[in-house]
Image (tube, grey):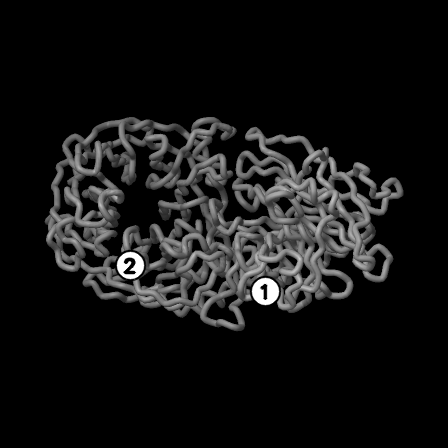
Amino acid sequence: MKLSAALLLLSQLAVSQATSGRLKEPSSNNNVSNQRTRYAKASKTGKSGKEERDYFNRVSNFFICSQIGASCTEDDATSAEIVAASEDGMTLIYTDAEKGGVGSVDITDYANPKGTGFIPTSGEPTSVAIRGKYAVVVENTSQDYVNVSGQLHVFRLSPMTLMHTIQLDGQPDSVAWSKDGKYIVVAIENERDEDLGDGGLPQMPPGFVVVLDASDADPSKWTRTDVDVTGLPGVRFPEDPEPEYVSINKDNIAVVTLQENNAMVLIDLKTKTVVNSISAGEVTLTNVDVVEEGVIRQNVSITKYREPDGVAWADNKHFIIANEGDWVGGGRGFTIFHKDGTIVYEANDDLEHITAAVGHYPENRSENKGNEPENVAVGMLDGKPAAFIVSERSSVIFVYDISDVTEPKFIQVLPAGLSPEGVTFIASRNLVVAACEVDDRGIAARAVISIYKTKKSELPSYPTITSLWSQSDIAAPIAWGALSGLSFGSEEHKLYSIEDSFYSSSRIFKIDTKNHPAIIEKTITIMDMNGVLDAAYPGVFGNADKTVNLDQEGITLDSKGYLWVASEGSGTAASGTPNILVKVDSTGVIHKVVPLPDDIAAKQLKWGLEGVTFVDDGSESGALIACLQRPWSGMDHPLILAYSIGSESWDGYLQYPLDAVESPNGGWIGLSDISFYNGMAYIIERDNQGGPDARVKKVYKFNPFDSAYTWQGEVINKELVYDMMPKLEEVSQGLTPEKVEGLAVNDKGMFIMNDNDGVDDYNGATYLEFIPWL
């Protein structure tokens, strides 16, 4: 499959915009005839005429912290690394290395999974496999990198009870159980010490592969054979193989990846002998980003060892490797091999480009291994074999049709929790399950098990926004992330948005919202061609190439066709950068810079300018209303400021009373975007919490023309318009985004959108949602 096919599919996703959740119309304008529910289809062919098919959609997230307390209010770190399912598909078992044990989850109702217990282990559990009534869990009990040891525990599933333990004489990394139940294979990695010398290979002791004969119903009678995998051809350091991951086909041939050695070995489990060893080779990627400079530039060619991590058999003759990289390599994609060592398919830079198109590209990993494909599972979708490749750094799952292993077809991308590690397909229930390991309440990230189910539809529910290819560089898509404010454009169905200071070269995005998903069809790079910004603030915002590095948080379009951007400052007035409004034309050239009034700017703290909106106040040029996120020094409330475009002067301010903090994790409440429509100013008020700690994500309105306001510091009267929490919990399945920072209101309803923080310590999901008036 060519890259163009994958991205073309993303850019052609087209059905009417989703409209679950509705608002009360503030005036007589209630024309919503063009709005459609996303999957309101009654036949094989949808209303748009497009053929329906099965797509996976995420239906739930099980929060690992709920095993500690149902409300997830504890700070204790947990994780979910590898997950396996019972054969009836009703129970999940996962490994939790942070807490040191294994947990169980009842998914009888997969939309409402329930934790059913946690069993501590003596070491660090690394992997789990299930067959029949037993689950086997391997754990690392090593003292250090030289004195290595491990165990395999056999648990009865119901109730979860330890039945037997087998010593492994090394550090296990993964385990697999053959489909006929006869064999269990453990990859004994004996991993390298990355802090020893240069951290490279070889480092003793060498790893090996354990094969257990599990044909007896009594686990205490299982027998163990150690298979030596040293000294094999195709292995970079054959004396130190470091087995990583294992998968078994129907013929009981195990394929084991040797990640740091950039190789795979095949073992016949009946004879316990190596039947082939294969170098994973190198891959040349022609359009990827390899520099962490705050700009996603996918225009460099590199050649790297693939260094595969996860592996899965596509059929009895072919297997798929996820080319994560661990040491000096990283293929950033996946490869399909014939068991004789022949490559039949290479994904090249597809995954890098798909993540860029859907806003999940991790710019901060460009100099490392990009999106880092971590693992792979094989299952079925729409009656055809499918591969599910998880990306650890982009926090997504790529779904490919592999009915022809020589030409896989990209089908869809699924959102996941932060850093998915393990993935499995449950054939009995047509479910995909991913274990997402990062858990840090301080950054609003909780470890989850994400569950996906098929549904017939014209298109999947995610992504809600994607991009077209750049017209200037057709080799890669328009890359984006960290979208903040929103504003309607002059054309129907068009929105403007901006990226914040996560990226170092500020851009404006033009978005077509006519269809689902919305399409980023154009970028406008802001340029200080005439030195306007640099004259006002020499050396503060400008780049050498005349691009600028603003912290764009709000955007609006005025009546003359100019765009105004609110750039948030940093730090204090004495030592930080200023909060400013920047006027740019349709080509991105800066025409004017407006600082805040001196008396207000002198009180600057962090949490500065967020939203800005154009107001038709009856004057020739109109006015702008902008908001500060939080109160500054000496203030009781954040300010709403008015600026007259015609007179080029600030006309005063109001004070905005914030709601009280409700989150069990504390934090603060602040303002985000602001949008003017039909005589009223609409504004986002939110807390700085995400996931199960999120509580306040609301849209309020106030009348800026109220005769009670002289704009001399009065406290406004606000009215609740819409509580976004139910909608955000619905679309994210409980992974409620913290930073809801985009709002655009018109006679049809409102668009809301979250900032994905450039996929840095966040799962990268962007939800652009339309809420129509009733």
Instruction: Mark 1 and mark 2 in contact? Answer it, CB < 8 Å.
Output: no
The three-letter amino acid code for the residue at tag 1 is Thr
Q: Name the image quarter holding the N terminus.
A: bottom left
User: Looking at the image, how many numbered discs can be counted on the residues?
Assistant: 2
* Mark number displayed over residue 141: none
Residue nearer the viewer, 234 or 591: 591
- Residue 774 percent coordinates (x, y): 74, 48
527 w.r.t. 446: above or below: below
Instruction: From the image, state whether disc 1 or disc 2 is nearer to you.
Output: 1
Is 73 on the left or on the right of 700, as rendered? left
Which residue bears the numbered disc 1?
A: 525
**Residue 665: percent from the left, percent from the top?**
55, 30
User: Could you tell me which secondary element the residue under label 2 belongs to?
Assistant: loop
In terms of depth relative to the viewer, which is nearer, 115 or 90? 115
Residue 502 shown left or right of residue 613 in the figure = left
Question: In this view of the protein, can residue 353 be seen by the observer?
Answer: yes
Q: Secondary structure at mark 1?
A: strand
Q: Nearer the viewer, residue 261 or 3?
A: 261
Which residue in the structure is indicated by mark 2?
306
Q: Position of residue 158 (x, y in %)?
A: 33, 29
**Distance from the alpha carbon under mark 1 to that under mark 2:** 35 Å
Estimate how packed mark 1 is, as few (under 14), some (14 to 19) or many (20 or more) residues with alpha carbons within 10 Å. some
Residue at 17% x, 34% y: name it: 147
**544 is higher (above) or lower (below) than 255:** below
Q: Earlier in the sequence, mark 1 or mark 2?
A: 2
Looking at the picture, tell me which residue is in the foreground, 616 or 623.
623
Q: Residues within 10 Å of mark 2 (few under 14, many from 20)?
A: many
Residue 101 vertical position relative to residue 30 in the rendered view, above or below = above
Answer whether residue 607 is visible to the viewer in this image. Answer: no
> In the image, is residue 649 above or below residue 113?
below
Q: Amino acid at mark 2?
A: Arg
Identity of the residue furthest to the right in this view: 707
